[in-house]
Image (cartoon, helix red, strand yellow):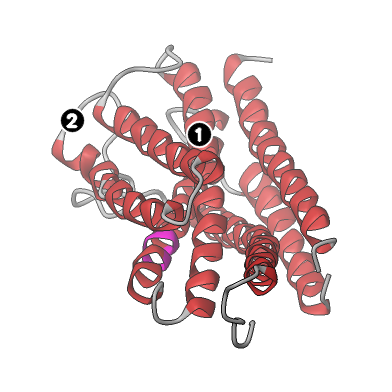
Amino acid sequence: MKLWRWLWLAVTLGVLAEGFRVALFLVPADSQQGDVQRIFYYHIPSWAGMGLFFLINLICSLIYLAVRNSNHQLAMKTDSLAVASAEMGVVFCFIGLVTGSLWGRAVWGIWWTWDARLTSTLVLWLIYVAYLLLRRFAAGPQMRTLAAVMAIFGYLDVPLVYMSTRWWRTQHPAPVFGGAPGSGIDPSMMPAVWWNLAGWLMWGIFVASLRYGSEYRSQRAEQDEALKALDAAPGLPQMAGGR
Amino acid sequence: MDIGHRHLILAYAATIAIHLVYLGYVAFKARVTKKLG
């Protein structure tokens, strides 16, 4: 692993440790829910991470579709980043669902309910799991194009998830940030939000960068194999160049 | 320990565990593809 990665990891772990300390021991407990509200400080960064990585996936998918026939190197890079960001987004989304369910059981008395926010989020998770399954099991040269198109359609659910608590008032609470006037949390709780937001996003970037590296290497090796096979095929004109 | 504290600990543990499982998968993939060059 390169030096900058080790440095990034060390800073990330430091920020996460501080985030843990601030969230659990420093900021005051919620006046109504008590200590269980501290789940919020891990719950929110999961959604922020999911939003960031699905957005990266969308941008990479759009670029891939635009350059796939004209710039193979850029196409391979964006496709590799699309895979890494989709996986990271799925992980963050899953954590959001799990922590939300644990929180819901403690404050609502139920693990799950089919309300607008929870259902649209579960559907979003399933869409991106399907995207990853398509990439894993579909064969043929069109797989990456199909996956990119699917990612663009899948992203349509993200704004729906975001707006669900604004459009429909069901079980899930109204938005804490960017909601109605007077929404938000006490300023004394904000340090826990910032530390954990920064720490988990840095963690996500670290892990996604590792995953990007391995995916890119794998795709490059696949391309080299294909070029070698073409060169070795009798009766075919020799391929010019490689990578 | 009441349900609030129990679920708070569970939520934090689940977050860390899921991230570590995925990190394990990523490390495995990196090791496999490193052999590809």
Task: Quadrant for residue A187, please give it.
Answer: bottom left
Residues in magenta?
A56-60
Task: Quadrant for residue A63, please give it.
Answer: bottom left
Determine whether, in the image, residue A196 is placed left or right of residue B30.
Answer: left
Q: Which mark lies nearer to you, 1 or 2?
A: 2
Residue A155: percent from left, percent from top: 31, 51
Secondary structure beneath dot 1 equals helix
The image shows residue A139, relative to residue A111, as above or below, that is below
Disc 1 marks a residue whose amino acid type is Gln
Residue A43: percent from left, percent from top: 50, 41
Determine whether, in the image, residue A67 is placed left or right of residue A40.
Answer: left
Determine whether, in the image, residue A237 is placed left or right of residue A119.
Answer: right
Q: Are marks 1 and 2 on the same chain?
A: yes
Task: Quadrant for residue A123, please give it.
Answer: top left
Q: Residue at x 75, y 59 (%)?
A: A13
Residue A126: percent from left, percent from top: 41, 33
Which circle marks residue A169 in the picture? Answer: 2
The image shows residue A221, relative to residue A240, as above or below, that is above
Q: Residue at x 65, y 20 (%)?
A: B6
Q: Residue at x 74, y 54 (%)?
A: A17
Q: Nearer the viewer, residue A207 or A78?
A: A78
Residue A40 visible in this rendered orientation of the protein: no
* Disc 1: host chain: A
